[in-house]
Image (cartoon, helix red, strand yellow):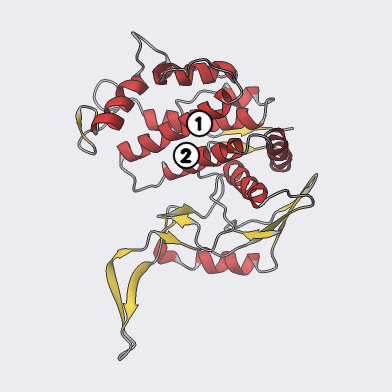
Amino acid sequence: MVEFGYFPDDLSINAGQVCISSLPGREAATVDVSALSQRIHNDWIYPPQMGVEITETGEFRANPFHTRIFSLPRTHQITHKKSDSDGHLAFHLWSLSFFTGMRLTSTAAGFLDATPIKPNKLNDFVLLGDSLSASVELAERFWCSNQNKPEQPKRFAAATHSLFLAQYPQALQFESFNYLYTALDSCYRIKACDKAFQRDISHPKRVKWLCEELGIDAPDWARPENKETVLSKIRNPATHEGLYEQEPLGFALHGIGDSNQNLNLEMQALICRLLVAIIASDSADYVRSPVNTRNQHGLKLT
């Protein structure tokens, strides 16, 4: 059993071997977090300011910067009747994080830079019916089917973490792009691990191949033309040369002028569909929904 947080709502889930329930102090913890209004903006909570207390006077002297890693109250607990390792419950928390659209952690200080304090801020779907309970069962199935490949659940967690990091409200565009590309590559590696490739698929072809494997329509920016894609034309110089849109990192933006494309938003949406398809094979309506929209989509898991 481990305690985790922060999640503001009541949870009561019994899914096979896994049980998730609220702690007695959840409501009080929610009130305490809501009271930190000076650290909250648009439903994101930011870390406290660092500083030191002057022993002689008791005065708090603030540093000119905030801490980056911070904690929030634990609000729930998760138990597994036959957990086979510490990583087992940790993986369930990453899956639960993805499906609730909030970063959840059992660690003492598991939040970096900022985190949402309301659900569905980090994904683009709303779970329908008893889908959250179903997601727990699907996560358990994924774990059990990969017991001889322990790197697979780690890759799912890594893709989820990168997806979340990319959505930090103060991130620069190139920073978000790099995190999102990493998440795409983690998804690719999960699926490629099941194949016996004699030679790895090249970067420009990976996203299209991955979409085809998972029954998703590949976006235009992932379709190769002359051995390159819109994605690889940005990724390659950014990764190898420190150039983003032909300028040093941070000095130019993609999607202005004639293109008017929010590539990062579409990458986020595609990653959500890829992760759902990796865990749940019967989610065709959602995974085939368009990625070039800010709309949230209903997701029914069984």
Compared with residue 119, is residue 195 higher up or lower down, i.e. above or below?
Answer: above
Give the residue at x 67% y 35%.
Answer: 148
Q: Quadrant of the N terminus?
A: bottom right
Give the residue at x 60% y 45%.
Answer: 100
Q: Quadrant of the C terminus?
A: top right
Give the number of the disc on residue 163.
2
Compared with residue 231, is residue 123 higher up or lower down, i.e. above or below?
Answer: below
- The quarter of the displayed image where residue 242 is located: top left
Name the amino acid type tagged 2.
Answer: Leu
Q: Secondary structure at mark 2?
A: helix
Name the amino acid type tagged 1.
Answer: Ile
Camera-side residue of 256 and 229: 229
Give the number of the disc on residue 271.
1
Mark 2 closeness class: few <14, some 14–19, many ≥20 residues within 10 Å: many
Compared with residue 33, is residue 278 higher up or lower down, i.e. above or below?
Answer: above
The spot of residue 41 in percent (x, y) is 41, 56
Q: Is residue 65 visible?
A: yes
Number of on-image labels: 2
Mark 2 to mark 1 CA distance (whole Å): 7 Å
Q: Secondary structure at mark 1?
A: helix
Q: Is residue 71 left or right of residue 28?
A: left
Q: Is residue 129 visible?
A: no
The spot of residue 147 in percent (x, y) is 69, 37
Label 2 or label 1, whichever comes before in sequence order:
2
The spot of residue 233 in percent (x, y) is 30, 21
Residue with the most extreme front position: 198
